[in-house]
Image (cartoon, helix red, strand yellow):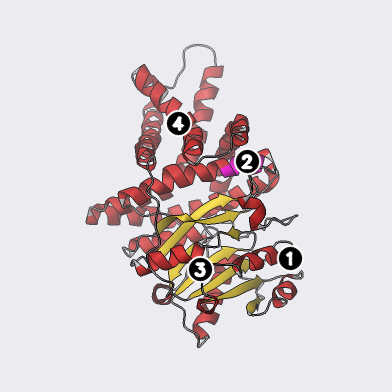
Amino acid sequence: MFNQLLLSLQALAAAIGVYQIVLSFFGWTHKKETITHQPTKSFAVLVAAHNEETVIGALIENLLKFEYPRELFDIFVICDNCTDRTANIVMQYPDVYACERTNTHKRGKGFAIEWMLKELWANPQHYDAVVMFDADNLVATDFLQYMNEDLCNGHQVIQGYLDTKNPYDSWISAANAITYWFCNRLWQLPRLNLGLSNFLGGTGMCFDAQLLKDMGWGATSLVEDLEFTVRCIQRNIYPKLNYEARVYDEKPITFRASARQRLRWMQGHFDVSRRYMLPLLWQAIKERSLVKLDASLYIFNAFVYLLGFVITLILWGDMLFPGEPHFTSIYAQMPLGVSLAIVIYGYIQCPIAMIFEKVNWRMYIKLVMFPVFFLSWWPIAFYAFFTQNNKIWSHTKHTRVIRLEEVQGQP
């Protein structure tokens, strides 16, 4: 009986994996987006910052170089519960607004954004759209041009391409960069090409202002980006990826810092999955919506990681006992050619994505350590499942300044 249950769970996880593999083939082609509209949309550019005195100046100087009419965008830095010089540094830049917030009970980016939007709506100045970045980001100077283009074409929620600004710092930052190249090319782009919904990535996001007013932010979990994505999809508003609008995010350089960050993501992912997955799945069935079915499978991925870890432990533990194995692997039930094809393609997806993204050859050397990074998701997911009620935001510290010219000049 337990073996049958185990096989059923393996079949479920394998089916979702095969679905993603099939989906990835639709990311092998990419049609470059073009700019056809003149700048007309006005933007409130929000930067979420908590104790970011090291990096906030570089980002502000970057944003002030946007290739977009200066009268059509304002920059607001949310100095959220800061105890350092973040606000003082922001105030040194004319026409950049330091918005100081102090609330020790409602901590975290989601709450900070919700507070800032209320402040923004109370401002007599009207904006067509709101763009959100993190303080450790760098942004391509044509970013607002692409956002203006998508807004003019009727899109209400847009996600930029999330790249990494420090891939060469350590094997951990390299592994994060590889993950992002893979997700952009073989997770996000296929959904764009097939007309499915893309998913917000926490930064480099653009929202129609009226939509935000009508919906309210309401996304205060540890993964506010995923939560808001699901709320949009439930209302038949599908976020769209703009593959040309680049945002460079700073990644942790130590395993410990990365594990803390990923633990927060997985805790939030389990929380969102528990609250939204079944209602969204039921909505997909009732409406016969492939978009909502795909989204429900996407937010179920936290449980796929959990199942993968638990099932692997059971199967490996079973092999340690003497005698014939008690439990059966799903791959043993498949034709050898099929199982090998699935396993091999699963392993080579990352280098395939890197080839498509024209990544420098030096990064392929980093693939040697990538399996360690990938497998570390399993125990993180396991621990996150039992601590998913945690609502404490963990802050990633930054130790050096990188500027846009350095990032774009990397080989």
Q: Quadrant of residue 100?
A: bottom right
- The magenta segment is 172-177
Pick whichever of labels 3 and 4 is earlier in the sequence. Answer: 3
Separation of marks 1 and 4 at Cα, in angstroms: 41 Å
> In the image, is residue 238 part of the stretch drawn in magenta?
no
Residue 128 vertical position relative to residue 2 in the rendered view, above or below: below
Which amino acid type is marked by label 1?
A: Glu
Q: Amino acid at mark 2?
A: Ala
Specify whether residue 174 is painted magenta.
yes
The residue type indicated by label 4 comes to: Gly
Label 3, label 4: how many angstroms apart (C-alpha)?
35 Å
Q: Residues within 10 Å of mark 3 (few under 14, many from 20)?
A: many
What whole-number distance in Å separates the C-alpha atoms at marks 2 and 1? 25 Å
Residue 145 seen anywhere in this rendered image of the structure: yes
**Contact, mark 3 vs mark 1 (Cβ under 8 Å):** no
Residue 335 sits above or below residue 288 on the image: above
Q: Secondary structure at mark 1?
A: loop
Ranked by sequence position, the earlier of labels 2 and 4 is 2
260 with respect to 192 (left or right): right
Q: In the image, which disc is placed on residue 174? A: 2
Circle 4 crowding by C-alpha within 10 Å: few under 14, some 14–19, many from 20 = some
Q: Secondary structure at mark 4?
A: helix
The picture quadrant where one finds residue 212 is bottom left
Residue 254 location, x and y as percent? 70, 44
Tell me the element at label 3: strand
Q: Residue 114: where, in percent of width, then height? A: 53, 73
Residue 53 disc label: 1
Q: CA distance from mark 3 to mark 1?
A: 21 Å
Query: Mark 3 — residue?
Result: 131
Query: Would you name the residue on which mark 4 appears?
Result: 346
Which of the two labelled residues, at mark 3 and mark 2, occupies the earlier sequence position? 3
